[in-house]
Amino acid sequence: MKYLKLGQVITVFALIFLSPAVVQPQNSLYDPLHLSENLEFELGFLSGYTGNLLNDSVGVEDAQTVTRGSIRYYPWAPLELNFDNEYTYYNKTYNLSSYHGTFGATYIPTPEESRFSVFLSATFDIRRYSETRKNFNNDNLDLVASAGYRIAGPLALRIGTAYHSNSYINSKVSSKKKWEFFSGLNSSFWGSNTIDFEAGYSNMDYSFILDTVWSIDTMFVDLDVEDYYSDGNLYAFYLSPRFSRSLGSKTGIGIEYDYHKFSNPDHAVILLSEVEFISPFANVCEGKSVTANIKTYMVPGFIITTGSGYWEKQYLKMLQGDINFTPVLFARKRMDFQSRWFLNMERPINLGQGAILKPVLNLDYTNNNSSHGTFDYHKWSVNAGITYLF
Amino acid sequence: MSPYLKSLAVLSIIVLVLSPAFADEPKGEKVTQSTFTDFDGDGIRDDAQDTNNDGIPDLGEPPEEPSKDNSPTETGLFYSEAAQEEVEKSLLSERDKFQKRKFAVRGHSQNRGDFGTGGFGPDEGMSSAVSSACPGGVCQ
């Protein structure tokens, strides 16, 4: 909780002592750093209810509240510095409440008129849970470098790389480091039709139990579960074609297909506890998906987005049951078939002098069928939030 | 996915691509093949103007009438488009200049990779209110 308090103190300090500059006259003698023009503040508040918080067959209902404060500073045209603080509180499952702090820098050295553009960013963020879930506390570092080139008119090419380090500070075997390389093209044709194709390759180092290990014994042998783990690399590639176009002057539709494939996962076994909610491998899977979104500005003053998607996901082999009495040989892959639908309504209000209020309302339905009964579930969620940008 | 659903999906895309009825141009704005760009995949042109900065582009609305003052730019006295652009650029704050650069790199500042499912739905839509709307902080 010390991180939460630290984050709150810094945010309040910044909001109190720096925000007056926003309403002061733009006089260089009074405001030598032009803080009034080059600082941006954001306050966010969201409250919601979900019929299945933990995404499993138990179906725990809960309500959540999220508060957020962000500061962005632009000392120089190519550079943005940002500092975000966010706290999520759960009403019943309060030990899942967490603090999320982010500090990042984005550098764009190329001018906007240039056909060739470069993007560089570095972000460090921490997530801290309450004492009872401190095993999930993690630190993350993200580095991204990418370049794009607009060949002619509507045709643009891109290439990039990203590094992600995810360190679970209270666990020896949950941390992951990942490199990604991606490349893509975007082109419009016949008016407002647009195709976008992206392909990429990822390499992640992680810890797992080899399926040649006969069994795990922590009762009669002086070993911890972590002593049975090996280190290795997981390779994956993906293909992602997307088609989008306008439907009239104020509405657009986008359809995307994604195919993700691991190249060498067959000998890796992880524990069931590692794929459960908020666990390190909860979102590591291969498979394919089709999603479609429609966005419209037809209702005056509103941005309305709705979408539907279908996923086939296959996770790494996992060992369930009591690990001391279950041979590793019994580990099986989990296969999920998931469909989702959502509706999002946003009503931005310009308050003048650069201040914007953004109320948002959201509905979401998920239906998940799994080869593992624990993960057979469906859920409804409703969220309402408001952001004040100034 | 059944073969019927696949066929239906392919047919729908063909109809969408070929249908000229949907491709009407916004009133007051001329959209040419060379100007239409959509890097975020929402089907709506990225560079649509938003004159009142409320986050909703002026799609289908007639452009605002230019003000009728008697400045040199209106009278044509010593007026040059390039000079006018230079003046406008010099008046921009560092924040505005950064936003213009950010707009120029929107096509490659994010990718759709990762080892799991990509961003979809409210996890993205709610991002204006919170950095991650996924329960517990992990999107699944």
Image (cartoon, rainbow, N blue to C red):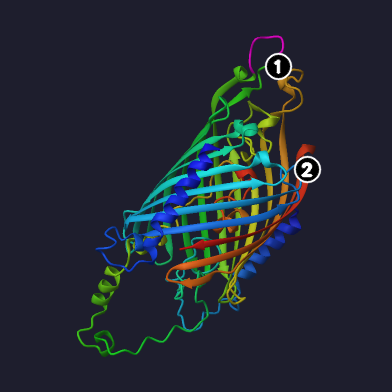
Bounds of the magenta segment = A216-224
Q: Residue at x 43, y 84 (%)?
A: B64
Please give left or right for residue B74 compared with residue A274 in the image: left
- Residue type indicated by callout 2: Asp
Q: Is residue A328 above or below residue A165?
A: above
Rendered-image quadrant of the N terminus of chain A: top right
Instruction: State whether the magenta stretch is mostly helix, strand or loop.
Output: loop
Q: Circle 1 — which element?
A: loop
Picture quarter containing residue B34? bottom left
Q: Inspect the magenta stretch and tell me whether residue A221 lies in it.
A: yes
The chain holding disc 1 is A
Q: Nearer the viewer, residue A101 or B53?
A: A101
Mark 1 neighbour class, 10 Å CA radius: few under 14, some 14 to 19, many 20 or more: some
Rendered-image quadrant of the C terminus of chain A: bottom left
- Residue A376 shows which numbered tag? 2
Residue A116 percent across, percent down from the top left: 34, 57
Residue that carries the numbered disc 1 in the rendered image: A215
Residue A228 percent across, percent down from the top left: 62, 18
Q: Nearer the viewer, residue B41 or A341?
A: A341
Query: Could you tell which of marks 2 and 1 lies nearer the N-terminus?
Result: 1
Q: Is residue A5 above or below residue B34?
A: above
Tell me, yes or no, if residue A151 can be seen here. Answer: no
Q: Is residue A224 above or below residue A153?
A: above
